[in-house]
Amino acid sequence: MNTIRLMLVLPLVLVAIAARAGSFEAAVVDGDGAALADAVVWLVPTRAMPAATGKATSASMDQRGLQFVPHVLVVQRGSAVSFPNSDQVRHHVYSFSPARKFELRLYKSIPAEPVVFDKTGIATLGCNIHDWMLGYVVVVDTPLFAKTDETGHLKISDVPAGEYRLELWHPRDLDAGTDRSEMIRIDGPAPTRTFMIRTRPPSPTTAPTELEQKFRAYRKTPPGDA
């Protein structure tokens, strides 16, 4: 009899839990009110939550047109990330960040092994050959995360009801030392939040021109040696 009751009650409980699950939507703008792409938001539960389906444990950051694509990649801790090279030239990818230090020496195509990111934090990536190449891997300890698109919007769906610590990050945050975390409660659909982040100008995305290189060399030349 108890088994029959449990079988009858359990679906109702699951429906109630699903009904309380909500979502989180946000718009991120810069200091001028312009849409800001590549801002990352993740939600860290303040207590143990029902098991949720995790995001993929593998991901990829390509190198195309002498750029990291995507510029910002978000993964869960423990994910294995591949760094294929779709360019016709070799790259030398590295990171000296505490979140993950690694080096992939000069190579083309796909490295034999992916890089496992087993610590939370921000890994800043560069190329030892092409100095202007810059990429970021954001490693979080929750499956509840999203990144803004070109319109500055993001959405995190299927968020179990409860309290969370919200974290916000952007690679060009002018106030990077500022604690942007805050406590929020999710209990069903919520209105879209808007966040403002003052940003630094974008870094160069191409190699310096021949004229720029000559100018830099000229500025480095000691007086009288020109």
Image: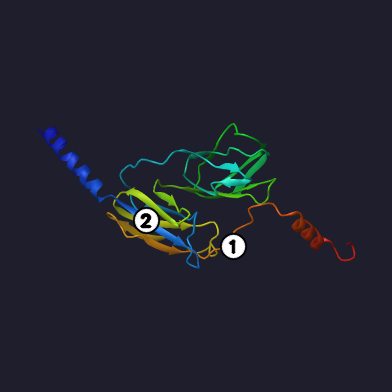
The correct choice, above or below, for 25 with respect to 54 in the image is: below
At 87% from the left edge and 66% from the top edge, which residue is drawn?
Answer: 223
Q: Quadrant of the C terminus?
A: bottom right
The correct choice, above or below, for 29 with respect to 158 in the image is: below
Identify which amino acid the numbered label 2 is placed on.
Glu
Name the side, left or right, on which 176 lies relative to 6. Answer: right
Q: Position of residue 193 (x, y in %)?
A: 37, 61
Label located before the other in sequence (2 or 1): 2
Residue 182 in view here: yes
At 39% from the left edge and 41% from the top edge, which residue is drawn?
Answer: 54
Q: Which residue appears farthest toward the right when viewing the image?
A: 224
Name the side, left or right, on which 140 lies relative to 201. Answer: left
Residue 58's disc is none
**Residue that mark 1 sits on:** 201
Q: Which residue appears farthest toward the top when viewing the image?
A: 112
**Residue that mark 2 sits on:** 25
Name the side, left or right, on which 17 lies relative to 59. Answer: left
Tell me how the rendering is colored: rainbow
In this orientation, which residue lies closer to the viewer: 12 or 36? 36
Q: Which residue appears farthest toward the bottom when viewing the image?
A: 32
Q: Position of residue 56 (x, y in %)?
A: 43, 39
Q: Secondary structure at mark 2?
A: strand
Q: Position of residue 113 (x, y in %)?
A: 57, 33
At 12% from the left edge and 33% from the top edge, which residue is drawn?
Answer: 4
Q: Which residue appears farthest toward the left when viewing the image?
A: 1
Identify which amino acid the numbered label 1 is placed on.
Pro
